[in-house]
Image: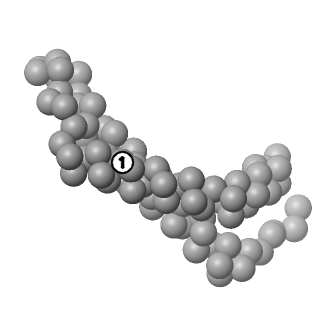
């Protein structure tokens, strides 16, 4: 299979998406806590809510650029 090359803008799109996705995942883990006491983590702070909304809207705004790249990558896998 020939190696596929992507433009720097496409790479930046994927890297930006990955950064925001990992940031969102970290926020969710932080807010939901662990399986250790106390069992119920405190409610999210206002800053947590703002960060969640910021990340959510960023991902939504960049979805149209990311999804075709992800689909192309996925379809090239064996």
Seen from this angle, which residue lies furthest left? 38
Is residue 62 visible in this depiction of the protein?
Answer: yes
Tell me: residue 40, above or below residue 26.
Answer: above
Tell me: residue 4, above or below residue 9.
Answer: above
Tell me: residue 76, above or below residue 3.
Answer: above
Answer left or right for 15 relative to 45.
Answer: right
Q: Nearer the viewer, residue 3 or 49?
A: 49
Query: Callout 1: 10 Å neighbours few (<14), some, many (20+)?
Result: some
Image point 30% across, 52% down: which residue?
Answer: 50
Dividing the picture into quadrants, the one containing residue 66 is bottom right
Q: How many marks?
A: 1
Q: What colour scheme governs how the chains and residues are painted in the rendered image of this protein? A: one colour
Element assignment for label 1: helix
Seen from this angle, which residue lies furthest right? 1
Image point 19% across, 31% down: which residue?
Answer: 43
Q: Give residue 75's position: percent from left, percent from top.
A: 82, 50
Image point 31% across, 38% down: which residue?
Answer: 29
Q: Give residue 72's position: percent from left, percent from top.
A: 79, 57
Q: Nearer the viewer, residue 3 or 32?
A: 32
Is residue 73 visible in this depiction of the protein?
Answer: no
Answer left or right for 39 relative to 73.
Answer: left
What residue is disc 1 on?
Answer: 52
Dividing the picture into quadrants, the one containing residue 35 is top left
Answer left or right for 77 relative to 39.
Answer: right
Q: Give residue 5's position: percent from left, percent from top.
A: 77, 75
Q: Quadrant of the N terminus?
A: bottom right
Image point 67% across, 73% down: which residue?
Answer: 10
Answer left or right for 60 relative to 76.
Answer: left
């Amino acid at each position: 299979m020939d190696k596929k090359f992507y433009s720097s803008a496409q790479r930046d799109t994927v890297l930006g998406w990955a950064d925001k996705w990992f940031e969102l995942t970290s926020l969710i883990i932080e807010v939901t806590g662990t399986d250790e006491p106390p069992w119920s983590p405190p409610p999210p702070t206002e800053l947590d809510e703002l960060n969640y909304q910021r990340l959510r809207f960023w991902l939504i705004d960049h979805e149209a650029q990311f999804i075709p790249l992800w689909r192309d990558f996925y379809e090239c896998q064996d």
